[in-house]
Amino acid sequence: MKIGESEIPFLPKKLSIIFDRTRWEEKALIKAARRKRLQTELIDAKTLCLDVETRYDAKTYGDVVLQRCISYFRGLHVTAVLEKNGLSVVNSFDTSLVCGNKLLTSLALAKAKVPTPKTCVTFTPEAALEAMDRIGYPAVIKPVIGSWGRLIAPVNDRATAETILEHREQMNSSLLQIHYIQEMVNRPPRDIRTIVVGDRVTVSIYRSAPAGVWRTNVALGATTTPCPITGELEDVAIRAAKAVGGGVLAVDSMESPDGIVVHEVNSTIEFKGAAAATGVDIAKKIIEYLIEISKR
Amino acid sequence: MKCRCSECDGEIAVPKDAVNGEIVTCPDCGLEFELVIDKDGKCSLKVAEVVGEDWGE
């Protein structure tokens, strides 16, 4: 019997998935929701016109809203409107805001005493050079907002730093005039992605960079293999997830000589690589969590 | 279902299990389209958005 033809009644609770592009993950989530007999409404954020005076309620948006926009700012603004109307959105506005901004994430991690690389932020090229002198070369420079490893650069020496900063100045982007600078962690050519759903670790994988590539993003060709969930990894990942406000999160960490350090927590998570590497039905775990939230 | 590419008139096959917002690519010219399915189940294509600086996870 096909999923749509099931005679099992739908659950009384309803889910909305707000999207702007349907990736592998959105398709997996839709299938998982149907299997759980959860009434699911798909809402394309690009078609929305949200009136600040209108009351949006569960009749239209369901008992729980899963915000899955690929555009950070679009998703954040949709969440702001729906949450102000008292709707339950996963992830919350606060979590999305913090995770979408590397500086806000670093601040949250540091406040919660989650191990994280040494980080500075500066607002002019001159101050950035001073920060890199202080942190020491090699360092890493990143945009505060952005994903998939875009415009993240290793900075091996002062000459490279000056060149990168000059390029940033020429780019017409105010975000790139904020220089987020981090120590280069002495790690193996891989990082660890740990998916945390609610207060539980779902899976953990190594993301290994291809030969000659420095960044470990799957979007840039990294391969994924299962990573054992040690006590240390579980503790750090759960604390990192709590530090940014909790929800459905992907905690990215590195194996430093002093232990696990968290460098990023992602909010609108991509998990195709993790699902393939581990065989775990991550979409199902997320849907089960949403059902749990909808009952609160 | 089959659609025509607005750029090169190539034929684009839309999978039966395709869902709203899914990306399909013209096999001839490589242009990416977003699938739009209306309330009556009718499919149409619109040129997909390009990657923005805030795109990602």
Image (spheres, coloured by chain):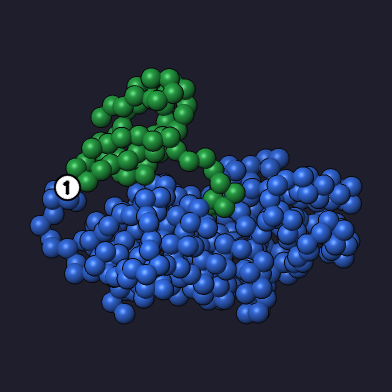
Quick check: A89 above or below A207?
Answer: below
Quick check: A28 above or below A96?
Answer: above
Visible residue check, residue A287: yes
Q: Is residue A265 left or right of residue A32?
A: right
Q: Colour of chain A?
A: blue
- Estimate the x, y position of residue A27 in percent, counting from the top left: 35, 49
Q: Nearer the viewer, residue B13 or A47?
A: A47
The residue that appears at 45% across and 68% down in the rendered structure is A80
- Estimate the x, y position of residue A44 in percent, counting from the top left: 36, 51
Visible residue check, residue A230: no
Farthest residue, direction front: A53
The residue that appears at 31% across and 80% down in the rendered structure is A296
Q: Nearer the viewer, residue A123 or A211?
A: A123
To which residue does mark 1 refer?
A: A2
The residue that appears at 37% across and 50% down in the rendered structure is A47
Identity, as a three-letter code, of the amino acid under mark 1: Lys
Q: Is residue A160 left or right of residue A262?
A: right
Of all chains, the one bearing label 1 is A
